[in-house]
Structure formats: structure tokens, C-alpha cells
Image (tube, grey):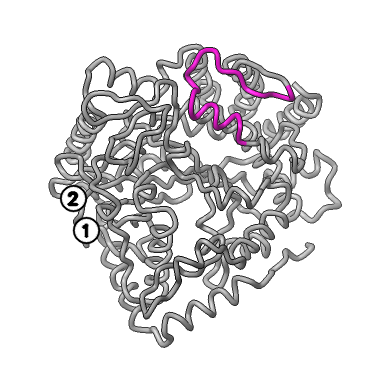
Amino acid sequence: MSEQFVNAIARLRGAARQGALGRLRRGIEKEGLRVDADGRIAQTPHPRALGSKLTHPHITTDYSESLLEYITPVYCRPEDALAFLADLHRFSYRHLGDERIWPASMPGRLDGNDSVPIADYGPSNVGFMKHVYRKGLDVRYGRIMQSIAGVHYNVSLPEDFWPVLQELEGATDTPLTHYRSARYFDMIRNFRRNSWLLLYLFGASPALDRSFLTGAAPGHLRAHARHTLVSPYATSLRMSDLGYQNKVQAQLKICFNSLSNYVGTLRHAITTPWPAYQRLGVNEQGEWRQLNANILQIENEYYSDIRPKRVARHDETPSQALEARGVEYIEVRCLDLNPFLPLGIDATQMRFLDVFLMWCLLAESPWIPDEECDRLDDNRRAVVEQGRKASLALAVDGREQRLADRAAAIFAELREVAELLDINEEGGVHVAALSALEPLLDNPEHTPSGRLLGELEASGSDFVEHVLGLANAQAEQFRAEPMDPAREALFRELSETSHQQQAQIEAAETRDFAAFLDSYFARARESRPTPAS
């Protein structure tokens, strides 16, 4: 353990005992494909009873009309976020008929690119922009990649925490907004260096249905049963080259050294044409194929395992919100759905993520030089492809180290953080989360990816057949469970109100789409720096 880390923990313990640190705040965004009784992606429209995809605050869709996305409010207790998420599932199952919510990250049965329906958000300019953006993803990358699902975990440290940490670190000469953003970027850099640990512990996609591939299978995949391909040591095919990866975006070299670097690189990407995308066309004889022909259509197109975030106002892009008011929270984006958990995530995993992120903040986090940027994802790539291989070695500080040995060293430091967070908790819940997961370091077959592959091999069943069994059991559970009457009434009200809000937005339109888009991108090019206060 570094001296900086030990000193930081020691100083913060005293503040925590005085109640000066507050509690972490977190929210969950959970995706899940709607499928039919055979595990095929649903071709039906988003159920009207679930509200408007455009305006509902908690139930929407991601890329596809079939890809449900649930968004919880922000809570201080993991159990509260999970309870809300569970009620979203229960409410949905009241209106899904014979459909199920697919519990795995890799999709069920597909029937080619066009079998993944693009989400439709209505004729308003803002709704049509969302639709055209998704059409752009189709022509650039194809729809099949967009059928993958996952969990996004949003975390913010309490507002009371930052002045305490700033004073303890002797950084009070820096404006608090700037200090907080800089420290969040410290966290992000350490996350990028060590996110392979999350992929090992929580990766749950070592197999896929053959229908996911349109060409020959890569060499690292082998056949299983009639319709399945597996990667024997893989942890997360979702995070591999088969998933959300893009060679054009790779040349952006976003290494998260500073807020200005991050925002500047993204702004360059949304304003710089890319020849291959220019050849695809943008608006061809009235048919919109993509929003523009730039490296990124909009900032959301950038794929990353973590993002700095700030809730944007109606006239801001995400980057402008960050520039104007600094980083507000962190979005962790590398998490597979755990198909064995009805919600895809549980409180143990959430508390581990909280500990891990706090460790990323408090551990030393030097800036990433250009020459390291190209190698930053090497460990992550190795764990994605071969994370459960006993002999796998990672590159750590210029030398090779076994994954299990490096993970054990990190767990020793994580325990210090867990004890710190448990000062204001009953029952030692963060230490308990670490204790529950630590045995996985020496037992890769017990990780979600190992467990899923083991069950497929033991049963001889196909991926879709096996996961459909889990989906059926979870659907039966959610349909049978009662909901809190007040929350059920709230969801019914939100659904109806969201349709009214969409209708109002559509009725208020006065500009054509091209003019709307020109205005949007003119604003997006503007810089809105944070005031020095």
C-alpha cells in the first residue's frame, strides 16, 4: 500500500467517525430485451401501458424498440434502488402478455440485422433525432451489436465529502468545483487501469447464440450443442471485439487525464467528418440515414467502460453540462447482466462497486502518458478473452503478475476502504461484500461466467434454451409477486402523464427537422467553461 493511500484512509477515518462524510448516492440503469416464448427478439411495439419511451422518467428503450431500459431514482441505500427496480419489473410483467425480459447480456435468437427493430420515439424533432441517431448506428455498426444489454451503475460521492477531502489534502486554494472534477478524473484513471477486476468478478457472457454472428465465427469461439458458440475462458463477450467496440472511435485516444482533455476530444469527434461515414450519406432525397457524417454523431455514441456525468439542462449537451458545472457523478458501463439474478445485479455487487470506486479515488492515480494510452486496455482485453484461465498474467507496473495474485493485492487495499465505509453502516456490509466475493479469485468456475459455462456444459443445452429457462422462472416470479399499491398507482400515473407530455411536445413543434438539427449542432460546438468559483 502506498503511503498516500494509507494516510488518506487514516485521515478519513476520523472524519467518518464524526459523521462528516455522508453516504454515497447511487442509481441503476438496467437493460433487458423483450423476447417471445421461444427466446426470439420481440417484434411488437413497446407496450403503451408502460408509457412514452420519449418522456417516461423510469421506463424507456435503448437502441431497439424491444430493448427495455429501466432507470431508478437516486438512493443512499442499495436495497432501496433494488426495490424500485424490482417494482419496475413487476409492473412491466402486468403488461407484457406472453413475452419475457431476457436476463442475459448477449441476446436470444435473432433473424438477421433487420430482426432488431429500431426504437421509434414519435414525430417530434427531439423524438425523430433519437430515431435517426439509432439509424446512424445501424449503417455504421449494424443493429445486431446494439441488441446487447447490460447494467449501468451511477455513483456520486456526497456533497459533504468533497470539502472534507479537499481540506484534508490541503487543496483549499483550488475552487471546489474544479477540485471535485479533478478528483473524479483521478478515480476514472484508476478505474480504467483496473476495470479488468470487475470483468473477472461480474462478467457473465461466455456464450452466445449462433444467430448473433452474420459471418464465420472467430477462432476463439468453439461450437457447443446445436446453436451455441462458447469461449472456454472468456468472462464477457459483451465487452470483447464482438460487443461494443469500434476501431474508428479507438483513434480518439481519450485517456481521461482532465476534464478539458475529455471534453475537447469529444467535441473534436462530433465536429470532424470521417470519410467512410461521409460515403454512407446523411440526408439522401429526404431519407435521413444518420445525424451527420462525423466521427461521432453525438457524444453518446462514444463507447467507454466509464463516463463522467452531469445532469444536463434542456439547452446543453452532456459535455457542456460538465464544462459549466463540473462532474456530478460517475457512470460505470462495463457490467454484464447476471442471468442468475432476477434484477441482473444485487446489493453485494453494488457495495463492492462502491468500495472499488472509492479505492480508485484514494489510491495514487498518475496521469496517463500517450505511450500508455495504447496499452491501457491490454489487461482488460486479456481478462475478457481468457480471464478464467489459471495461468493468465497481467501487466502490472512493467512486469507480469498472475491475475489471482494481483487481485488479492487489490482486495487487501479494498478491505481498508470497506472498513472506512462501514464506520457509518450497521453490520459491516461493505466488508461482508468483499468477503462474499473474495473466494472467486481462486475459484473462477464460481464466477457468473464460469457458472453459466459450467451449466451449459453439464446439461448439454444450448445458450438460448438454458437462458430461456431462467427467463421463464423469473417471469413467473415477478408476475406472482405483489406490488406496493402506492407505487403501482404511481407507475400508472407516470405512464399516462408521459403520453400527455409527448403529445404536448409534438403539438408545440414549429421548425422542420433540418433546422432543428442545425441549431442543435451549432449549440453543441460552443464551449461553456466552468466558472472559477
Q: Is residue 35 left or right of residue 420?
A: left
Q: Secondary structure at mark 1?
A: loop
- Expressed as whole percent of the image width and height from the top left, the position of residue 255 reads 68, 45
Residue topped by disc 2: 96
Task: State the quadrant of the C terminus.
Answer: bottom right
Give me the C-alpha separation between circle 2 and circle 1.
7 Å
Identify which amino acid the numbered label 2 is placed on.
Leu
Which region of the structure is painted magenta? 377-398
Q: Is residue 399 magenta?
A: no
Identify which amino acid the numbered label 1 is placed on.
Pro
- Residue name at image x 38 percent, y 39 percent: 82
Residue topped by disc 1: 47
Task: State the quadrant of the N terminus.
Answer: top right
- Expressed as whole percent of the image width and height from the top left, the position of residue 63 reads 37, 55
Other-residue count near label 1 (Cα within 10 Å), few / some / many at <14 / 14–19 / ≥20: some
In the displayed structure, would residue 284 be above or below residue 451? below
Other-residue count near label 2 (Cα within 10 Å), few / some / many at <14 / 14–19 / ≥20: some
- Expressed as whole percent of the image width and height from the top left, the position of residue 202 reads 45, 29
Task: Say whether marks 2 and 1 touch (CB < 8 Å).
Answer: yes
Q: Secondary structure at mark 2?
A: loop
In the displayed structure, would residue 50 be above or below residue 40? below
